[in-house]
Structures are given as structure tokens and as C-alpha cells.
Amino acid sequence: MAFLGFKNIKISGFSAGVPKRVVSNLEVSDISEDYSAEDFVATTGVKERRVDAFTAGDLCLAASEQLIADLHWDKSEVKALFFVSQHADYILPATACILQDKLGLGKDCLAMDISLGCSGWVYGLSVLASLVSSGQIKKALLLCGDGKRRAVFDDPLFGYAGVVTAVEYSEGAEGLRFDMGTDGSGFDAIITPDGGARNQFTHDSLTLEEVDGRKMCRLQSRMKGMDVFSFGITTAPKSIKKLCSQYDIDIQSVDYLVLHQANMKMNDFIAKKLKMPLEKVPSSMYYFGNTSSASIPMTIVAELKDKAINKQSKFLCCGFGVGLSWGTVYFETSNDLVISNLVEL
């Protein structure tokens, strides 16, 4: 486990952008040969998703414009922008560079991409925190998203979203505390086999094959379900407990435990292991699905907008999955936290 702590920094706001188009899994006839659409919804907790012809960059751009306006930030003061996704707009250049220009940020703005999935928001936040806590960068944006416009086939588990987290230097603030980890031996537990440098795209990449009762091509992500479930219910609670132990955090005093939105049964199991009441464990997957690196802020925007503003709140957030990698962060928000209205494109 890698413990990291950064003081003199605070999270100032959250925003999220999603497509207007809603797809109901109850209306999808070919979810699986082995179980019905109703069974899929009951098992995963994903009834609806937002999907359309948008990239993660498109959604993050709209969410960024909204949050910057709501915070009344001067764009010239934003000196860092990180974009976290495993579905960048282009193979190259970095999507962060494009977003820096589209947002009208200064040319003195540091911009870079980070390629991570389920744990990506926590990892990106740790990198941004390390820069901002020094005071040399005062305001920064963390953009995370998933929009598989390049995918040939849809997946009933995943939705599209782009989220933005605003971070700024704040003298004397308690800051953020992290626990991070990686187990690359499980790299193939969640994998898209073709389309990268190792297995490049060919005609065969589009050929359908049987994978766990579904017809899939090699450009679709596939997972070893039981391995991922076991990983999630074991690693996430361990990481959360170790972070709390390391920094003397009373987990029962936490207002919200926000987990990566992978699977409802998995998250309920994690909450039970931690003895956290479910009313402290918000979920957005019923209406938005698994939105990968966007899922934690997506849940905060969708479920906590009217609960976490105008008050001080304690958050524990944990992302875990593809890599395999995981990250847990603890932070407190002040009564001036901004949570923007959901942006729909």
C-alpha cells in the first residue's frame, strides 16, 4: 500500500455531463443467452444508461464550462488540467491539450492525459493534489470520463459520462489523504483484447465469438466476472480500513462512502463489510450505469447535490478495477462547496 497525504488543498466543486439519450436495459432483448433483462438489472443494479455519439472529451468540456461558471473562476488562473480516461478522443495528441484550447485556458496551463479506468479519479486526484499543495499552482481541474464512441458494439453495463473536479490551494486546509495500490498480475481480468499496439486492429477483430454467454468481438471489453467480484469485495474494504488506520479516521464519523459504481451487489457487500449504513453509501448506477473513472464524482453530482452543499461533509471514496488497481481517498468539504446541476447534451 502507498499512503500519500497532501495539506493546504481543498476540493472546491464537482460537475458532470451526460448524453440526454436514455437507454433502458429492460428493453434490450439480447443482453445474454443465459438470463433475462430483468435478471441482469437485478444482478448489476443497472436499469438505465446514457449513451450517444459523444466522446469523453465532449462531455468533460461541457461539464467544465458549467463548473467554471458556477465557481466564478477566472480561466487565466487555472494552471493545470488533467484528463483521465481509457477512451481518449484520439490515439494522439493528448485529449487534455485539446480541452485546454477549447476551454480557453492560458498557454501556461499544464495539460496531460492519464490512462486509467475504475481507479482513475482517485489516481488523478492524487497527482493533481501533489502539484497544488505546494502552492505553486493555485487552481486546477481534474477531468474524467468514458465515452466509447469508437466502440462497434454497445455494452449494457456501461454508460457515458464526463466529470470535473475543481481543486485549489487553501492555506491551512487539512487536505487529502490517499491509499493506492496495483496488482498487474491480474491485467487480463478486465481487458479489451484488440485495438492497441500489441494486438492491432484487423478484420478478425470484428468477428463475433462466444464470451460468457454473449456474442462479443475483440474490440469489446470483457471480464472474468468472479475474479473481479472477489477482487472488489476483498481489496476495496482492506484499502479503506488501512487508510482509516493510517490517518486515525473514524469510519463511522464519515458522512458519505462513495464507491466506484461497478455492481450493486458488490458495493452492498463492501458496505456490509465496513458496517456502513446504506444511507451513507450513495449509488448512481441504477440510472447511469458503470461510468468507469467518472463514477465517483458522477454519484456525488447525481445523488448528493442537495445534501453535501452548504455544510461541512466528510468523504471516503474508493475506486477499484481494471489494471488491477485501486485507490482510496479521504477529504472534507467546506460549506462553500459547489456541485453544479447535471449537464445534459
Image (cartoon, rainbow, N blue to C red):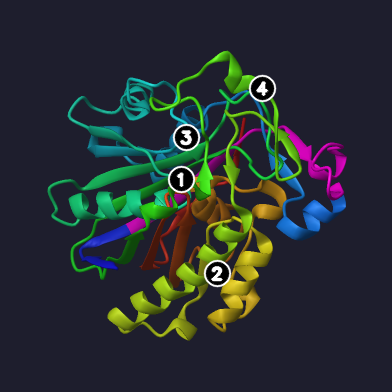
User: From the viewer's perspective, is the residue at label 3 or at label 4 nearer?
Assistant: 4
Disc 1 residue crowd, few under 14, some 14–19, many 20+, Cα 10 Å? many
- Residue occupied by mark 4: 207
- For the residues marked 1 and 2, what is the alpha-carbon distance in whole angstroms? 18 Å
Q: Where is residue 216 in the image (x, y as percent from the top left)?
A: 68, 32
Amino acid type, residue under disc 4 in the picture: Thr
Query: In this rendering, would 122 be left or right of 105?
Result: right
User: From the viewer's perspective, is the residue at label 3 or at label 1 nearer?
Assistant: 1
Identity of the residue drawn at 83% across and 48% down: 34
- Residue occupied by mark 2: 233
Q: Quadrant of the C terminus?
A: top right
On the question of residue 247 being in view, the answer is: no
Query: In this rendering, would 335 be left or right of 227?
Result: left
Q: Position of residue 251 (x, y in %)?
A: 45, 82
Segment colored magenta: 11-37
Earlier-in-chain disc, 2 versus 3: 3
Earlier-in-chain disc, 4 versus 1: 1
Mark 4 residue element: loop
Earlier-in-chain disc, 3 versus 4: 3
- Quadrant of the image occupied by residue 228: bottom right
- Quadrant of the image occupied by residue 97: top left
